Amino acid sequence: MKQGLFVTLEGGEGAGKTSSIPYVQALLENSGREVLLTREPGGTELGERIRELLLTPGQGEIHENTELLLMFAARAQHLQTVILPAIEQGKIVLCDRFTDATYAYQGGGRQISNERIAVLEEWVQQGRQPDMTILFDIPVEQGLARANQRSDPDRFEQEDLEFFERVRQAYLAGAQEQPQRIKVIDASKPFEEVKQQLDAVVNTFLREHNLS
Ligand code: Z5A
């Protein structure tokens, strides 16, 4: 069995990642490979407990460095015990958020330097990057309006507009630096148009990997 592949989904609040997961999963399954669906922070028992700590509001102040280290602690466990073994078994791993979210939220949002994040990234990932990342881009106010309809705000969703504007700009800067890996879709469009963009991106990716 050939090595599997690693695909991640990214985007700001209310961009529609979660709603699109079943559609992306089905497109990837057309390759004939098994698709493992997972998420960050989370994806392991320990990681889900860290997620709870990070997302639940009202637990007192969490210092930005602590937040950053917890993201990578959860990621180390996830990568070593779930993601890499699945790729070894030939599966396609589809992960809802990964390290691009750290550059966007802890880098852009919290304004921790990219250099500091890169040190942890190298330490935890040792060069391992997603094979493709789909970035759901949406204007901040439109995304927040969607997210607010859906559920009570989590700890991140309580931040202000400037925070989310910095998150968006950090995501877009990453996509400009790595256009080969990060594919931007216009998530402000209705579901049907988002699906058409996903068809194009995922089917091209599968062709490039001789899987269609
Ligand atoms: N985080 C971090 O800081 N650092 C890190 O390294 C990592 C994560 C990995 C948890 O993420 C938080 O962790 C996240 C960043 C931080 N911040 N927050 N919050 P998450 O992925 O679990 O967050 P989420 O709450 O699931 O996702 P989201 O960004 O808020 O939403 P979404 O998944 O992109 O949107 P959705 O739930 O699919 O859609 C929202 C609503 O819009 C829903 O009612 C849909 O029906 C509607 N929708 C979606 N698409 C459309 C279209 N096209 N048209 C109309 N309506 C739509």
Image (spheres, rainbow, N blue to C red):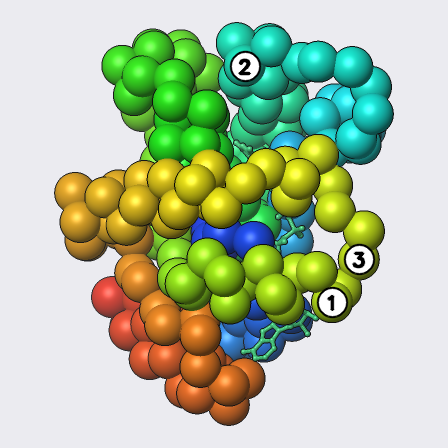
> What is the secondary structure assignment of the residue under circle 3?
loop
Q: Mark 1, residues whose alpha carbon is within 10 Å: few (<14), some, or many (≥20)? A: few
Q: Is residue 211 visible?
A: no
Q: Quadrant of ligand 1?
A: bottom right
Residue 96 in view (yes/no)? yes
What kind of residue is marked 2?
Glu
SS for callout 1: helix
Cα–Cα span, label 2 and label 1 = 28 Å
Q: Secondary structure at mark 2?
A: helix
| Residue 163 in the image, given as x and y percentages of width and height | 46, 38
- Going from N to C along the chain, the mark reached first, 2 or 3, is 2
Q: Which mark is residue 151?
A: 3
Q: At label 1, which amino acid type do we have?
A: Gln
Is the residue 37 above or below the residue 206 in the image?
A: above
Q: Residues within 10 Å of mark 2 (few under 14, many from 20)?
A: some
Q: Which mark is residue 64?
A: 2
Asked whether 112 or 69 is in front, the reply is 112
Q: How far is mark 3 from mark 1, CA to CA?
A: 6 Å
Asked if residue 129 lies left or right of residue 49, the reply is: left
> Along the horizontal axis of the image, is 117 left or right of 34?
left
**As displayed, is residue 173 above or below residue 209?**
above
- The label shown at residue 149 is 1
Q: Is the distance from the Cβ of mark 2 to the nearest ligand 1 atom less than 8 Å? A: no
Residue 205 location (% of width, % of height): 31, 66
User: In this view of the protein, which residue sits in the foreground, 160 or 126?
Assistant: 160
From this view, report whether residue 197 is shown above or below residue 5. Answer: below
Q: Quadrant of the C terminus?
A: bottom left
Mark closer to the chain start, 2 or 1: 2
Mark 3 CB in 8 Å range of ligand 1?
A: yes
Q: Is mark 1 within 8 Å of ligand 1?
A: yes
Q: As shown in the figure, which amino acid type bears the numbered disc 3?
A: Ser
Do tag 3 and tag 1 residues touch (Cβ < 8 Å)?
no
